[in-house]
């Protein structure tokens, strides 16, 4: 009897061991499969990095810095993303001045150090790229917000090694104007521009039109009562003074499309918000929410009229690397293309405002709403909304 019991115990133990072994094999097989998938993904990334090994992307900044919270920074962030994902080297150079020769010097330095694609942000590079495209035909150039032309503007020409990228700033401004009208408590709104150039003008015209659209369609009663071009993109103190003057007049929302001048406006809003005033800034070019943070953890950035500069920089670097660079073309990126808009997250907008701006975005994308891109179009737009010159809307 004892022998039989021992024998049966041995059988049970053997069966249990076989189940454990099977389970262990199943787990090992599953782990092996997962490891294989992970290794395949890693190898694929490594292959991509190896494919573009030795490639370099360069950037020449304008008169601002790489941390200007605007155009330079947005471009550089797109370059950094591409460099990280494709395993290529990146470098930026800041010129010693603002002349065409200054820009050409740094472009030449990047070419000499084997940077195969160079990105230049802004209209100030138009003449430099006009000359560089001929001098360096084997180098690819991305000119953001500009078209290559001769010094006397007698010739505009974009060669096969250049792509010019423009944005529908008026659409981004329009969306921001709608949001500003919906959120303003005083109904008084302002606009601060930097230099009076087309991209800045289009932000302002679109912003004014957006305020008027909200009044006509969403029962707001806001007015753009102050509208100023400071004349530069770098005078921070001037931006702060202009913003202070507007806030003193009862304005509670200012759209600042002005680079460093806009930074000054942000500083003034932060000071006043810390002191208990309910004032706002609408940012520009990039999502400036973090730049408006104050000590209590909130931000004075109501929303931002964004141009997806970083996406454009990334996309054309990728096109260059993969052999489909759209050289010789002038490309206009709009809301329909995902090239402009408000940030995905807007903590300071109410749910109702977010819903209404999403509705307007859909209208811009399908063409049922057209944001004015010229001052003449803005005048016609305001008239269509029932405004006259005596109604107080300035631009």
Image: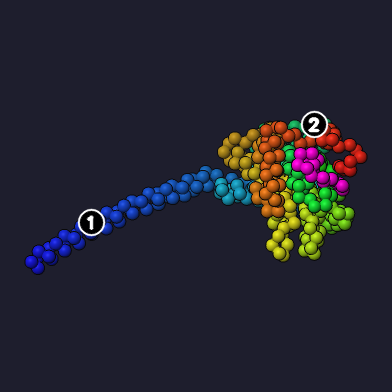
Residue 235 percent location from the top left of the image: 83, 54
Which quadrant would residue 308 be assigned to in this image? top right
Residue 221 on the magenta segment: yes
Q: Tell me what residue is drawn at x 74 percent, y 46 percent.
A: 179
Residue 156 percent location from the top left of the image: 77, 32
Determine which residue is flagged by label 2: 155
Determine which residue is flagged by label 1: 18
Q: What is the secondary structure assignment of the residue under circle 2?
A: loop
Of residues 303 and 187, the one nearer the viewer is: 187
Q: Give the crowd class for mark 2: few <14, some 14-19, many >=20 residues within 10 Å.
A: few
Which quadrant would residue 223 be assigned to in this image? top right
Q: Position of 23 compared to 174: left or right?
A: left
Display coloring? rainbow
Question: Residue 312 shows which numbered tag?
Answer: none
Q: Position of 201 compared to 53: left or right?
A: right
Q: Residue furthest bottom?
A: 2
| Quadrant where the image shows the C terminus | top right
Of residues 295 and 230, the one nearer the viewer is: 295
First of labels 2, 1 by sequence position = 1
Q: Which residues are magenta?
A: 210-229
Which quadrant would residue 118 be assigned to in this image? top right
Q: Tell me what residue is drawn at x 65 percent, y 50 percent.
A: 345
| Quadrant where the image shows the N terminus | bottom left
Residue 347 percent location from the top left of the image: 68, 53
């Amino acid at each position: 009897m004892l022998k039989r019991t021992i024998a049966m115990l041995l059988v049970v133990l053997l069966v249990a061991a076989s189940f454990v072994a099977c389970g262990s094999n199943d787990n090992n097989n599953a782990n092996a499969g997962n490891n294989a998938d992970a290794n395949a993904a890693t190898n694929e990334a490594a292959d991509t990095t190896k494919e573009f090994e030795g490639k370099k992307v360069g950037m020449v900044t304008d008169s601002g810095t790489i941390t200007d919270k605007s155009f330079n920074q947005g471009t550089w962030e797109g370059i950094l993303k591409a460099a990280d994902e494709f395993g290529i080297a990146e470098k930026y150079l800041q010129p010693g001045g603002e002349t065409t020769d200054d820009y050409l010097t740094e472009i030449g330095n990047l070419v000499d150090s084997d940077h195969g694609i160079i990105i230049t942000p802004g209209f100030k590079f138009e003449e430099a790229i006009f000359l560089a495209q001929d001098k360096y035909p084997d180098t690819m150039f991305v000119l953001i917000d500009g078209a290559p032309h001769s010094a006397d503007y007698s010739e505009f020409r974009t060669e096969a090694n250049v792509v010019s990228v423009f944005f529908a700033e008026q659409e981004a401004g329009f969306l921001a104007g709608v949001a500003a009208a919906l959120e303003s408590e005083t109904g008084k709104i302002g606009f601060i521009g930097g230099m009076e150039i087309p991209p800045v003008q289009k932000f302002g015209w679109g912003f004014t039109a957006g305020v008027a659209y909200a009044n006509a369609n969403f029962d707001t009663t806001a007015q753009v009562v102050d509208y100023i071009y400071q004349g530069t993109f770098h005078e921070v103190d001037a931006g702060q003074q202009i913003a202070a003057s507007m806030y003193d007049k009862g304005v509670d929302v200012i759209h600042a499309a002005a680079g460093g001048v806009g930074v000054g406006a942000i500083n003034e809003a932060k000071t006043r918000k810390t002191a208990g005033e309910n004032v706002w800034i609408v940012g520009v070019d990039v999502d400036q929410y973090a730049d408006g943070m104050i000590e209590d953890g909130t931000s004075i950035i109501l929303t931002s009229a964004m141009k997806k500069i970083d996406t454009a920089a990334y996309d054309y670097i990728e096109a260059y690397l993969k052999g489909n660079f759209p050289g010789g073309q002038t490309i206009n990126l709009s809301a329909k293309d995902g090239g402009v808009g408000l940030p995905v997250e807007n903590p300071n907008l109410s749910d109702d405002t977010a819903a209404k701006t999403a509705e307007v975005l859909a209208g811009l994308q399908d063409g049922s709403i057209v944001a004015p891109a010229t001052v003449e179009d803005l005048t016609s737009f305001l008239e269509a909304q029932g405004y006259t010159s005596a109604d107080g809307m300035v631009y």
